[in-house]
Each structure stands twice: as structure tokens, then as C-alpha cells.
Amino acid sequence: MKKQLLVLALGLVTILGVNAQTSVSVRDIQYVSPTDLAACDDASAYAGQTVKTVGIVMHDGNLTEVSSGSVNGGYRPGVHLMDTASGAMMGDFSAVQIHGVYEDGGQSQPVTALDNLVAGMIVEVIGEVGSFSGETQIYPSDASSVTVIGTTTAPAPVTINLGLLNDASRVNNLGTGEAWEGSLVTIENLTVVAVSSFSGGTRVSFDVSDVNGNVINVSDRFLAQKLPSWEPRNASSPQTTGEFVTPIVGSQFESITGIIVHSENGCTGGTGRGYEINPFDTSHYKLGDTPPSITEVTRMPLVPTSSDAATIAAKIIDFNGTVASQTLYYTTDVNAANASFTAVPMTLKAGSTDEFEATIPSAADGTIVKYYIKATDNDANESFEPFTASAATGATAFYTVRDNGLSIVDLQYVLDPSSDASPYRGQVVTVKGYVTASAKPYDLEDIYIQDKDATEWGGIHLRGSADLLDLWRTEEVEVTGEVSESFGFTEIIVSSVTKTGNTAEITPIELPVSDAAGRADNGYEKYESMLVKMVNAAGKVKISDPQFNPFGEWTVSNDTAADYDNSTKVQTGVKNNNNNSSLWVSVLSDSAYETLDGILEVPLVEATKDMEMDALVGLMYYGFGNYAVKPRNNDDLQGFTPALDSAKYAADTSTISVPSFKALGVSFYPNPTSNVITIKTASNAIGQVAVKGLDGRILFTEQVSGTATVNVATLNSGIYLLEFTNDSGQRASAKFVKL
């Protein structure tokens, strides 16, 4: 996501160091003129100003479920307010979100009072008007800036046409949609056209279309759409898990009700999902007619050899009738239209009432086999698995026959780059690869491996096992784990790691630094997680935008004047929930990141357009709808001008000297722990403690002196890193287990 704080050039009136407060209505804050909207400007007239406003709470605060690695405690509260002048029902420009975070001593703190608000309360809010991904929000000044001053009837939704919000490509219709940003609305007569599972299968969103083809994403900001595998982040949540049942493609909804949230795209230049609708109550989903449900699809064996037939099985149920037919379709011709696949009737498995299976014959080693399932109910409603197979050339499931086991290429390769999920998503696999980035000092402090012979599809990111921390660049490893998709980024959640003893230096794949055509239609997907080298065949690689966005990202190209489409995005010096880049690269977009979201380990060099380099090396990353390169250390900015300190990357532990906790006179206990860790420093020494995930992301930091406690109760069970930095800059880290 892109956080953009728009500041109106009116200036701020300051009295005795305190920002003056302007009393305005919710509608005044949200209103944007038709002229501005036509010019693709949806900024509030009060952007950047501290205001006081009064509104009616639209939903209970304890229903919000927004994780945030940048907020202390890992959770961001939030509620939506309706203008008190709107009466009982929503009107245009009459709602706004309270972004439940304030800054205190450089730390993002949650406004926990929001969790206790109930729909119908009237509250007064003091805070700064800002914007997040195109959505106008109020940022409270501090923990006490939200005050309950009365109660009234909870706001009721208004029914609107989906076409006011988005078009058929899910692009926001700013001119008519902005009026409903933050509002509680109902949209009628919808069909599910796509379902997206992410965050390791713990979250789901889905796209619905109206009769005119306009599309909106139904998102999971609230508890109502959290799956049973979800553990609530909101400590005030009324449930211990989610309960949402994922709809299937083709399902009909009489209506869906929810809060409209803006995720900008289109003319505003964002890359989000348009206007989204977020239900917060189970009654907000009014289901209509449904086709058969096809779930729990399996393939045995998972990786067929040339001597194996493959048995495809699935649970097929019709919730409002009976299943009339169920058929498996397959082909070994990757160019075949879906309608020309070979059809095999699926038969009921012995002892089951709803599980069906069919067999695909064996094929030669290396053969790609495509397949899908079609089911029809007694009302002639049809469903497909995968749902995209309903189109003549739509994406299907597939596998590659392998006599020698899976490779990283098999995990990453997709027939259609626009459908970028691994064909092995959710499966436990074993693959080998050479380490291209490690968790060691002078490196990315994140782990990637690569097939040394692959030129495409050959890299993958690893997380999960603490043993990954012991890997060094160039080592070959065999890993076993579950293939996961995180917002389109494929990775393995590793359960076991074995070093083979082999080593190899991976040569980066050369790519043009300015190549809009190459990136079009997810063209860079085949290089995801591979070590790449961005070059300019005509000369030097130049910095085209030193401050591309407020998240520490910058861009390079063959021309300092190049726009984003002709540039490559670079991530350096930031470790948070949105950007896990290296702290061993000197060049940053903003000097603030020298100590913000991680402490820079090398001398700072703030990026400017007069800087250049021979080539940029790094790992190709995908996140928030865009590709970016992550250099591992200064040596990856080859031939940089001005010269940078060498990274001096260590080849083994004997060349690295990292002080231990004991050497710094620091100890901690207990380990494992359930709730708190006690830190003891010698002679009441002062320092900073950071709790990190195994991927290097900083979850939170605290200042300590003498004996202090660190609360880790909100962390999920697992292995974490505890890092201590003393006032001399010396640093030590150790693993601990959260029970």
C-alpha cells in the first residue's frame, strides 16, 4: 500500500507550539468538488490540518481486524464515522475513517479506545486529516483524542449502484465513487467472479460483478470475513477465531452490505483494487442461488513420474439441490482450448457420499498436463475448478511429469503470468537450491535460494525454520515446506533444512533497467525471487526518482527523467511489514530511514539524481502489485558514484565478530516465554531492544535501562529474534521461543 499524506499549502497556525484546531463537519472533511474529481484529485480541502469533528460511530470497534507490523502490538484499530447531519441513513460525502494510530516518541501506538466504541455512539475526534491509498482519514493526535459525547441510532446503509464505484476492470470511478468513500452501503444482484486466498490461507477476499459487469472486491477489514484459521489480532474481539465460509465462483448474492474503502488506481496513479466493500456483520451477506461447490481437490501422486497415472479427487456438493454430473477434463496439449480437453466422468469414491474421482493416464517425463473439473446441478447451474476454466482459454490446473522430483522452476512456473499463483500452493514439497541471500550480517538478512542452471522461474523465498538463519550465500540446501502465496509473492514456509555440502556462485540474470514492454502483463513474474542485474546497454544506470514514495523506495533507469513505467523500483534500508530490505546498503531515499524501521549498518548516502552506477544487482521481489529489486549490500550497487564502503560480505562465521549478549553484559529470561521477557543490563546500561521475525522484520522496539520487561504476549507462537543495541552502537541478537 502507498501512504500519501497530502498537505494543503495554507500552512498551520501554531499557538505556543500546539496546532490550532479547526471545527469542521465530517462532510466538510470528505467533500471534493466535481471539478477536482474530474482532474483526478480527491484530496480533502483540510489535508494536513488538525481538525475537530463530531460523528456517529457506524460499527462496533471490536469488529475491526487490521494487522500492522509498524504499530506497537501488531494491530491497528479503526472505526468509521457518519456526519451527525445525515440523519438515520447515509448520504454522499458523509462518512470518514478514524485511523487508530498516533505517534509517540517515534513509535506508532494504537488508539485502543476505538476498540470500545459501539455503533450509535456520538464521538468527538481531534486529529490531522491525511490520506492512505487514496482514502481520506483522520489521524488522532494522541490516545485521548477520541471522546464519547452521546448516543443515537446506529447508521443504516443506503443502496447504491456498483457502477458508481468501479468499472468492469475494477478501476475506481472517482467522479461518482468518491462521494461514498467510508460510507455504509448495500449493493444488490451480484455474482462471485473471483476468489483470492492469501496470507498462507488464513485470509480471503473475493470479487463480485453486477449485471453490467462492474466489479468490486469484497475485503476482510472486519471479523465477519475472517476464516476459521484466523486468530483475531484485536484483543477486544468477541470471537477467538473467524467463522467465514468462502463463497465459490458463480455464487449469487441478493445483496452485500459494508463499508466502502478506497484503494486507489486508475487516473490517480495508484495500483490498488479500486473502491472495496467491507462487510462487518454476517447479515451483510445475503446469498442467492449457488452452483455446485467443488472443494478439497487432490492429486495422487502430487508429482507423477512417467510410470504414474494421476488420480484427481474432489468433494462436490450442491447446497440447494443435487449434483447432476461431475466430469474431469484433461489434455497434454498446452495450446488446446478448454472445450477440446478429454472428458472423463468422475465416480463416487467407495464409502463416500460426496467425494468423486477420475484418473489421468501416465505421460512422458517433462510433459505438462492441464486439467479442470466441471460440475452441474439439477437447475443447470455450472461450476468449474479452477473457476477460470469456464472461459475458452481460461487458466486450468496443471502439473509437470517429473522422474527426478520437483525443482524450484516447477514451483514458480505458470502458464499464464497474470495468474501468478504456484501450481503447488498449499502443498508440502521438497526442492534444492543455492543460497543467493542470507540472514547473515552484510547481507539482505532474508533468505532466497535459486536453481543455478535456471534462467527463468528459478528463485524462491524461504521463511519459517530457525535453521534458515545458519545458511550462508553460495551453499546448496534441500528444503521441505509448504508452498505459500503472500499477496502474489510465492514462498516456502520451511519445516526442515539440509545442507548438501555443495557450493556455487550464482550469476545474476541481466535485465534492461528500462523496459516497460518487458514488464507488461506481469512479464517480470518469471524472474520473481531470482538474482538479477539491472543494466543500461547504452551506459550508466541512473537514479530517476530519489524519493519514489514515502516508504523508502527509489527508482533507477537509463535516464534521470524516466517515468515509473520506464524505471525499476529499488528497496533499501527499511525493515517493516511492507518493505523488508537490506540495512547494509548505504543509499536511501530519505535520511529519516537511517534510524526509522531499522538502524542502517553502513554510512548513509541520500539518493539524488546526479548519482549513477554500472549496474544494480539484487533479488527480484513482488509486492503491492509491483516488482522491485532488493540489493543485498553496497557491493550490489556496482561502480556506484560516489564510491560506497565495501560490504565485506563474510564467507563464514570466522570472519564475523558479533558481540554476544554475555559480552555486552546483558541477559534475558525466560526462554521459552508466554508473556514477557525480562532484560538485565550491567551497571544499569541503556540500550534498545528490538523484537524481530525470522525474516528480519522489526515487530517492535523498546528502550531499556537496568532491568526491564518486554511484553511479547501479542505475538503468535513461534521463534523470534531478540536484538539488543547499547548506547555505543554495539549489537547482539539471540533467538527466543514464544509459546
Image: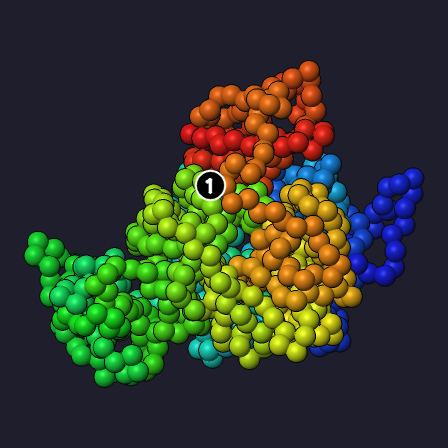
Residue 397 % position (x, y): 29, 69
Residue name at image x 11 percent, y 59 percent: 349
Q: Quadrant of residue 711?
A: top right
- Who is closer to the viewer here, 726 or 420? 726
Task: Report which quarter residue 110 is drawn in.
Answer: top right
Q: Quadrant of the N terminus?
A: bottom right
Q: Nearer the viewer, residue 435 or 85?
A: 435
Up/down of 177 relative to 638, above or below: below
Q: In the rendered view, does 514 fall on the left or right side of 216?
A: right
Mark 1 Cα-neighbour bin, 10 Å: few <14, some 14–19, many ≥20: some
For the residue pair 222 and 718, the one nearer the viewer reads as: 718
x, y (%) of residue 215?
A: 49, 72
Q: Residue at x 49, y 74 (%)?
A: 523
Residue depicted at x 33% and y 70%? 387
Q: Is residue 464 left or right of residue 692?
A: left
Q: Is residue 252 visible?
A: no
> Percent position (x, y) of residue 143?
69, 37
Question: Is residue 686 shown left or right of residue 273?
Answer: right
Residue at left 38%, top 55%? Answer: 433
Q: Amino acid at mark 1?
A: Leu
In percent of width and height, residue 317 lies at: 22, 61
Most extreme residue toward the right is 16
Which of the colour schemes (rainbow, by chain, secondary structure, one colour) is used? rainbow
Quarter of the picture containing the C terminus is: top left
- What residue is pinned by disc 1? 469
Q: In the image as oriented, which residue stretches furthest toward the left?
A: 350
Vertical relation: 488 (above or below) 414 = above
Q: Nearer the viewer, residue 543 or 93?
A: 543
